[in-house]
Amino acid sequence: QAEHDRAFNTAKQIAEQMWVKYCNGLFEEVVGAWKDEMMNNKKEKLAKQQQAMEESRQKAQQEKDLREAEVLAQKMFKSHCQDDVKFCLDVWITEHKAALHLRKDEEAKKKHEAELAALRRLEQETGERAALQIAQKMFQKIVDD
């Protein structure tokens, strides 16, 4: 009986050791799976955070680029408008100067024509007076003879 008790105690100890070993194995397996799950969750969370940060950075960069493009477009539009106004003003000044020059030329031409007409009248009057004087002298000469 003692030998049987010893064998039973030994078997019981072996069974308990195997049970503890089995439980420890299961515990390590569960803890390992839990650690793997936690690491995967951390990696996914980190990846999502990095992706969100990258998307946020890209969005911020796009907004900045858009603002810069709008400012540049406004500057270009303003410059274009100023160029158009300058062009129109230059054309108006050129046309105004041409019209002013034409008006002055016409006024000078009219003045010159008036002066020529006055000179012609004066010459004609002077010629008519001279002709009248010659005619009177000839008449006087005819009468005196």
Image (cartoon, rainbow, N blue to C red):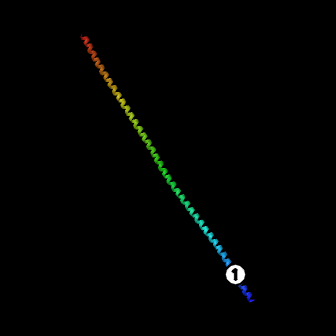
What residue is rendered at 70% in x and 82% in y?
14
The image quarter in which residue 124 lies: top left
Vertical comparison of 81 with 3: above or below: above
Q: Residue at point 67% right, 78% down?
A: 21
Residue 19: horizontal and vertical position, in percent? Answer: 69, 79
In depth, the one of 15 and 63 nearer the eye is 15
Query: Measured along the vertical axis of the image, is residue 98 above or below residue 12?
Result: above
Residue sitting farthest toward the right: 1
What residue is rendered at 59% in x and 67% in y?
A: 43
Which amino acid type is marked by label 1? Glu
Q: Secondary structure at mark 1?
A: helix
Q: Does residue 51 sit above or below 4 in this rendering?
A: above
Compared with 15, 96 (above or below) is: above
Pinpoint residue 121: horizontal percent, then vertical percent: 33, 23
- Badge 1: how crowded within 10 Å, few (<14), some, or many (20+)? few
Q: Nearer the viewer, residue 54 or 92?
A: 54
Where is residue 63? Give x, y as percent. Answer: 53, 56
Q: Quadrant of the C terminus?
A: top left
- In front of the other: 59 or 18: 18
The residue positioned farthest toward the bottom in the image shown:
2
Tag 1 residue: 16
Q: Is residue 112 left or right of residue 73?
A: left
As drawn, is 89 to the left or to the right of 114? right
Q: Is residue 26 left or right of residue 55?
A: right
